[in-house]
């Protein structure tokens, strides 16, 4: 597909170069420390969620709770 593009046009030439670079990047191997199984992946996600919640709780503890009107709460439900 890239070979069929009109290389004489500067825009098309730029597009062809970008596409070539993109597809060449896909060929590169991504180094990893180890092959993860499903349990490892779940554990990593749970740890990230726990850390995010911990950070959010630490940030929220320093602030007063937001007041919500009854109408707004009912509409959001």
Image (tube, rainbow, N blue to C red):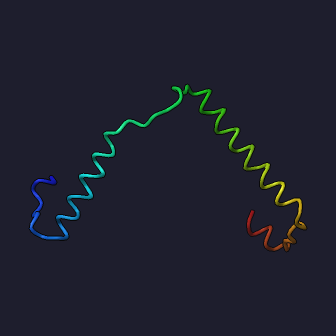
Residue pictured at 54% horizontal, 27% vertical: 36
Image-based side of 62 in relation to 73, left or right: right
Residue 23 location in percent, x, y? 28, 47
Against 73, residue 1 (above or below) is above
**Could you say which is closer to the camera, residue 48 or residue 11?**
11
Residue pictured at 63% horizontal, 33% vertical: 42
Residue 27 location in percent, x, y? 31, 39
Determine the image quadrant of residue 60.
Answer: bottom right
Residue 47 location in percent, x, y? 70, 38
Residue pictured at 53% horizontal, 29% vertical: 33
Residue 72 location in percent, x, y? 78, 72
Residue pictured at 70% horizontal, 44% vertical: 49
Against 18, residue 67 (above or below) is below
The mark tally for this picture is 0
Determine the image quadrant of residue 77.
Answer: bottom right
Image-based side of 15 in relation to 67, left or right: left
Image-based side of 49 in relation to 26, left or right: right
């Amino acid at each position: 597909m890239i070979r069929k593009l009109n290389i004489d046009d500067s825009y098309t030439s730029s597009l062809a170069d970008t596409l070539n670079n993109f597809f060449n990047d896909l060929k590169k191997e991504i180094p990893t420390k180890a092959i993860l199984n499903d349990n490892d992946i779940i554990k990593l996600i749970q740890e990230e969620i726990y850390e995010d919640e911990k950070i959010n709780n630490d940030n929220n503890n320093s602030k007063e709770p937001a007041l919500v009107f009854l109408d707004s709460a009912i509409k959001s439900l």
